[in-house]
Amino acid sequence: MGAKDHIKLGKIGEEIAVGHLLAKGYRILDRNWRWGHHEIDIIAQDQNVIVIVEVKTRRSNHVAEPETAVTRKKQKILVYAANAYTRYHQLYGDVRFDIVAILLNPGQIMVNHITDAFYATLC
């Protein structure tokens, strides 16, 4: 898969993830928010909790499930960016880190929403 195909697949996955989150009653606060070289795919609100969402989309789970791509290094980057986001927007309160893993098989879309996928204190 070329770079353009990879970006296109990611955008499709993010659209599916946003639809999934909205259907669950989340409010979308921001998308593709950047702080320096770091990016948060989706920032949402679930009741009184700010939710930092990393979206991973794959066409196959032949090698591994999409969520396994959220490595310890990526988790640290997300925590850093989440801290910047909450400071920048002066948001106080609980922050949660979720992963939305999406598999796009021919004729089938599978969404695996992992809430509390990791904790900032463990990064």
Image (cartoon, rainbow, N blue to C red):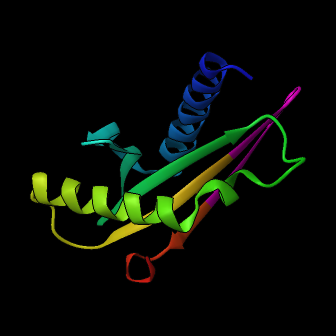
Q: Is residue 111 magenta?
A: yes
Residue 49 position by quadrant: bottom left
Numbered-mark total: 0
Residue 14 percent location from the top left of the image: 54, 35
Q: Quadrant of the N terminus?
A: top right
Residue at screen point 41% across, 66% down = 76
The image shows residue 97, relative to residue 52, as above or below, that is: below
Where the C terminus falls, by quadrant? bottom left
The stretch drawn in magenta includes residue 42: no
Magenta span of residues: 102-113
Residue at 29% x, 55% y: name it.
81
Q: In this rendered view, identify the residue nearer to me: 101 or 47.
A: 101
Q: Quadrant of the rendered structure where residue 68 is?
A: bottom right
Q: Quadrant of residue 4?
A: top right
Q: Position of residue 72 (x, y in %)?
A: 53, 68
Question: Does residue 40 appear to the left or right of 74 in the view shown?
Answer: left
Residue 3, x across and y down, in percent: 61, 21
Residue for point 24% across, 42% down: 36
Q: Nearer the viewer, residue 42 or 46?
A: 42
